[in-house]
Amino acid sequence: MASLKRSAISDPFASNISSKVYVRSTKSGKVQKIVREVYLRQDIPCSSQLCQACLKTAPRNAAGELTPFVLSDRPAGTKTYPQGHYLVPDTNAFLSAMDLFEQSSAFYDVIVLQIVLEEVRNRSLPLYNRLVGLTKSEDKRFYVFFNEFRLETYVNRDQGETVNDRNDRAVRKAVKWYGEHLAQTKTKKGEAPAVVMLSNDRDNLRKAKAEGIPASSLADYVGQLKDGDKLLDMIPDAQDRDVVRDKKSNEHLYPEYLSLSKLMTGVKAGLLHQGIFNVSPYNYLEGSIRVPAFPKALLILGRENINRAVDGDIVVVEVLPKDQWKEPSTKVLEEDALTKNENADTEEGQDFITEKERKALQEEAKRTLQKTTEGHAQPTARVVGIIKRNWRQYVGHIDQSTVSQAGKQGRKQDTVFLIPMDKKIPKIRLRTRQVAELLGKRILVTIDAWDRDSRHPAGHLVRSLGELETKAAETEALLLEYDVQYRPFPKTVLDCLPKEGHDWKVPASTDDPGWRDRADLRDLLICSIDPIGCQDIDDALHARPLPNGNFEVGVHIADVSHFVKPNNAMDMEASIRGTTVYLVDKRIDMLPMLLGTDLCSLKPYVERYAFSVIWEMNAHADIVGARFTKSVIKSREAFSYEQAQLRIDDASQQDDLTNSIRTLLMLSKKLKQKRMDAGALSLSSPEVKIQMESETSDPIDVKTKQLLDTNSLVEEFMLLANISVAGKIYEAFPQTAILRRHAAPSKTNFDELSNQLKVKRGMELNVESSRALADSLDRCVDPKEPFFNTLVRIMATRCMMSAEYFCSGTQSEDEFRHYGLASEIYTHFTSPIRRYADLVAHRQLAAAIGYEAVDPSVRSRGRLEAVCKNINVRHRNAQLAGRASIEYYVGQALRGRPAGNEEAFIIKIFSNGFVVLVPRFGIEGLIRLRDLAEPEPAAEFDPETYTLVTSGSRQVKVDLFQKVVVKVSDEKNELTGKRGVKMELVSP
Amino acid sequence: MPLDTSAYNLALLRVDGRRWNELRRLNAQIRTQAAADGSSYLEMGHTKVMCVVTGPNEGGPKRGGGSGPGAGGGNRDSKDAQVEVSVVVAGFSSVDRKRRGRGDKRILELQSTISSALSASLHTHLFPHSTITISLNVLSQDGSLLAALINAATLACVDAGIPMTDYIAACTAGSTSTYAANDENADPLLDLNHQEEQELPSLTVATLGNSDRIAVLVCESRVQVSRLEGMLAVGVDGCKQVRTILDNVVRERGKRMLMEGAVEKGAAVGMDLD
């Protein structure tokens, strides 16, 4: 009978073959036992240039090329090992101190054992990639020794031995073999270099000592080096040792949420507080929440307290006991930097709070402990429940360093991190099979869930938008990120347009129903003034002297409500879009092009329907009377601001049209003065204009916007029209008028800024009333620095509340005030082509003057409240999108330009960095201490005087409001693939 | 988890410790089933297959017997013997226990590839109106399955004493770099195991005897054309090594049979006994 049994003698390799058996569990919880062959061999070289024996058997690749030996024949010595030494670090050494190994001053001739490499890979893919990077660099002389494949160094796992113990033993065995192997090589100097094991594991060190293997702890070893003191800082604290291993994984990372009924009763009883959770843009571990019960926002610090809340969620918080109150952080914490070593797929094995995060928190704690006596601490809170998630779709890109090699080939399912564009959103864990295709792309994802036992929220891919940094992808990303509806108008909407299309004309016969109740203003000298290239002209103006010495001034607004009837598809679409969004190179319309740029647009030389506000004013710009009427106008000219300005300034132009603009200008100046006297604020935000190359529309330069008199001319009359209309519709509809208000900022908002001004410049900021604030802002002048005033205004603007639309019945009358404009009542009426609120105001005004019947939709308070809520959000998003678009184009404009030095001002200081504003580009940039010099200089931050003094590798002193020179360049972060504007401090 | 194939460039070692041009341990026996016309058992690393050959028998294979596709007695009129191959993959052969249906397309393809490869080498014209049934059982899988099956079938046919032109010896070849990686110094690899097959481009090649004549070439992954030549050369070279091993197995067995007197003395034996 034949037997399938193999006799050992017949197999010459028997002793050289081993198998590796390990158990792995799959995501679905299945346990798999994997058996792999391991071929043990004796031709794996030690790779020391001293060794002749290994050279003979050294491997060659398919082309017959020999891999050169890596380890130097004259390695550096230390006090303990004067003959020179090679290092063999164990896994923990790499995990805890990878930065150390990347130093250029020490750590040469390092032997990376295969088993160590494997363990590092399992712990952290990013660290593994860094380590592999080290082994590839020629000057560092890192050699990967495959100890698991070498017969002499292979170790079998003993019965009852843990994997870690077995691996430690394998490391020791390899070190021992290396030592003995090298001892056989004869060196000219006599003694062979020592092979030293580096480990932080006490047990391992003890065993090594017992076996007579040279070993040292990281700290001891570094202590012997020349610049050891500096490097010592890079070793994590002793108490953190050994924590990485043997961590139990099945405990929950986050506390559980309370039940909904508990939350509700808690909120009702005033024990818990509900509000919208906001994340600090500079510190991802710090959030704040405004609740009605407290004048100041509550702080929410740390991962555990934030408890899975994402920016924008409506959460319920519980105030923490007073001994846990803290100051807001003065440190910049960026998620990418702190957690870049995380592994996406094996997160169970990791500490909940990474070591670096813990370190950052510890520093914070230390700082607050020193200061608690001074009473700066703010109440803190923790999230106990979430009422409503505000998750949306997020745009971002995949963190390259979390991608495994196998994933790059795109066959295996891989878990990777997505870094969202919005810094306030945490990294999102993504499982995908198409990593290879998604790398380097802008992608859209949604968050699915955030479980208690998962450090990061889990999401899934929605779609890819295209290559990073291509115009199309980035623009779409912006639109998605700010939830701008950019899809083409559906057919149902287009069906609502007039059938005549572009041929539509104001009916010739005044008997036409279109002419009903319309004033014929076609003979007035009306013109429009807008930015260059404006196509959607909402407004036009006229002024003419009256026989009684007064002036008749008219503001004519496109009569959009004639074309957009309430509750049809077009109206619905417009109410959803809420506003037109202006990006640098693109406009996303609220209404279809036909209306926006043609039929409604008050183009010159053609007749158009309009809604007119006509005042009679005396020479002091006091309003004698006002009337509102639907009308037909014919604009005589469409000016740009510049053209209008030139025309006014050119004394030779004495025609009626020019003179009427001069009248307007004269009146507008008086109006402005009145407004200022009433306490209107002149606020500021950095505005720039991108110059495009006309053909490719690539950005080529950035210019700050210039403000002309004509800008303010148009603005004044628009404000006046809005105020007049607001009064009229409120009178007609006390409960349902659509108005706009700007709440007075709470005093605490200005605390920081006024303190900063007081400390740094001895200036007082009076925030009693808008008038007082306006006056004190006027006094904030630095004679040496003209921009200083603008800077203060920019910073003051950020302390303000944002203005909002509301329905008059929802607020008491004294809440109607518009703080910034110092007006008792205000609405938006003048841009119905691009804002939905104006369209509603038009309908209400039309009803108020008896032009048409009141449509139920403009009378229903519930409906209007919903509209207000939506357009408030849309309005804000549109602004943000516009700003982000400018920021992107500024970045693109900088790209390829040589880095230039620019003036900048310091607007915020942290203990580990500061923020500068570059007026020329209107952008802000963060400069961290570690950007200043290598290694990172030590720094002393004094929050009392807002100064940061660095010492060590670079000595600078930076003050708040200080003018500095920075080098602005464009940089791509290789690790994350993110491009951004980089700023370097040039002087001081 | 051990390292993946991307670690090759660190020390020119593959995931299991082999060099680029090394076969795995290849072990084979013939005449493992005394009752069968021909039988063999073959291991390539952890890929283990056994093969039983029945025939050549006149008439079609019995209905219901583990026959391959297209089986059904249609060969009564043909001048050549039909080679019917059936492959059964044991449920316990891979990490996850998985039952493969009879109509599994992958198995059908394996069967037809082996069948056409062997028909070309076997002298089927000597057995008109008959069928040679080759039953292959996969006991354990660790890459290079097709190659192992072809090698086992060849051995079993030799054992069955069916005249053939030469051995058909097969092995796989791959490349250390993936299709996407634009790596100039990608080494070709010989005899891939399961992990390598999953991660790297690979092809299966079988040659006729010691010649460079290729009997089978299957490539299911994307490979850059510039690397194909190197892979093929390594694969063909590997096939020659495999042939030598197979040949040794047959000779060993023959020698033992002669020693044990299984072959009549005086029968013409065309080989040296030492």
Image (spheres, coloured by chain):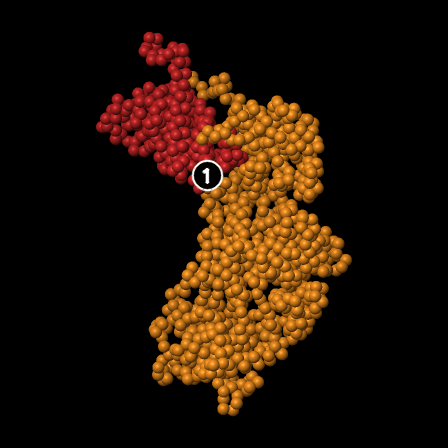
Chain colours: A orange, B red
Name the quadrant containing residue B207: top left
User: Does A669 sit left or right of A326 as displayed?
Assistant: left
Q: Residues within 10 Å of mark 1 (few under 14, many from 20)?
A: few
For the N terminus of chain A, the image quarter is top left
Residue B60 vs residue A453, the one in the foreground: A453
Name the quadrant containing residue A821: bottom right
Residue A963 vs residue A422, the one in the foreground: A963
Residue plotted at (46% across, 45% down): A436
Q: Is residue A196 above or below residue A630?
A: above
Mark 1 falls on what kind of element? loop
Q: Residue furthest right?
A: A373
Q: Is residue A336 above or below residue B100?
A: below
Which residue is labeled 1 in the image?
Answer: B183
Task: Residue A540: give x, y in percent of width and height.
Answer: 46, 77
Residue A511 vs residue A90, the one in the foreground: A90
Residue plotted at (65% across, 34% down): A198
Residue plotted at (48% across, 77% down): A647
